[in-house]
Amino acid sequence: MASDQPPSPSRRADAERNRDKILAAARAAFAEPRAQVSMAEISRRAGVGMATLYRNFPGRRELLEALYTDEVDALCEAAKTVGGETQGAVFIAWLHRFFAYFNSKHEIATELLAQSGSDNPVFSENRHRVLATGRPLLVAAQEAHEIRDDLTLEQIGDMVIAIATIHGDAEHVEPILRAALDGLRPVGDAEPA
């Protein structure tokens, strides 16, 4: 017979720790090249039973959605912590985090797209959150005349995403990203980032 009382704080803490362990194990598994990771493997890596895994995430899609949303949460939180001497430097630092975010979620997003399609609200809601987070950084940098004002955040984001899809290791791609971000400075102000 089920109890009508809410779970104790220690049970809630245990449940939260299990959820965090599952997400950490899944994040690590999906970060591996060409990962074909089963729910059973995620359960094993997290050190939790299958019942605990499915209690937290009823299916693979829900797990992928949680991983995707967690990555967006981290990117949005980064907007509060990126530093720089100028508004332009703050925006450029956030774009570097956006680049890393896109690379880290690529496998997760690809599988989530395959499972649920592009009309999954997780994509549109999180895109909106990313734009809402980055827009004030761009506006502040543009108002300080440190980032050119003829580009929108959507255009800049598309540029960063396009660069992130270039095949090659970091030694190949990073200089391309730096060159593109240098191009965001007003004409005559470009210097290496």
Image: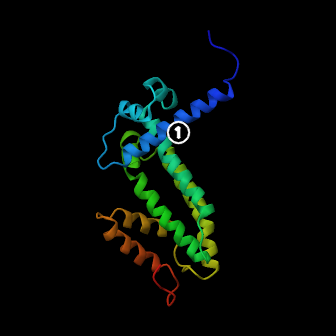
Q: Position of residue 156 (x, y in %)?
A: 48, 70
Image quadrant for the N terminus? Answer: top right
Pointer 1 residue: 20
The residue shown at (69%, 16%) is: 4
- Would residue 6 be found to the left or right of residue 169 on screen? right
Give the camera-side residue of 130 and 86: 86
The residue shown at (62%, 72%) is: 139
User: Residue 43 sits in which quadrant?
Assistant: top left
Q: Secondary structure at mark 1?
A: helix
Give the total number of marks visible in the rendering: 1
- Would residue 41 be found to the left or right of residue 57 on screen? left
User: Residue 40 sits in which quadrant?
Assistant: top left
119 in relation to 5, above or below = below
Identity of the residue furthest to the top in this view: 1
The residue shown at (64%, 78%) is: 143
User: Residue 83 sits in which quadrant?
Assistant: bottom right
Q: Position of residue 71 (x, y in %)?
A: 50, 51
The residue shown at (42%, 75%) is: 178
Q: Position of residue 153 (x, y in %)?
A: 53, 68
Identity of the residue furthest to the bottom in this view: 188
159 in relation to 5, above or below = below
How packed is label 1: few (under 14 Cα within 10 Å), some, or many (20 or more)? Answer: few
Identity of the residue furthest to the right in this view: 5
1 in relation to 109, above or below = above
* Colour mapping used in the image: rainbow
Give the camera-side residue of 121 and 163: 163
Mark 1: which amino acid? Asp
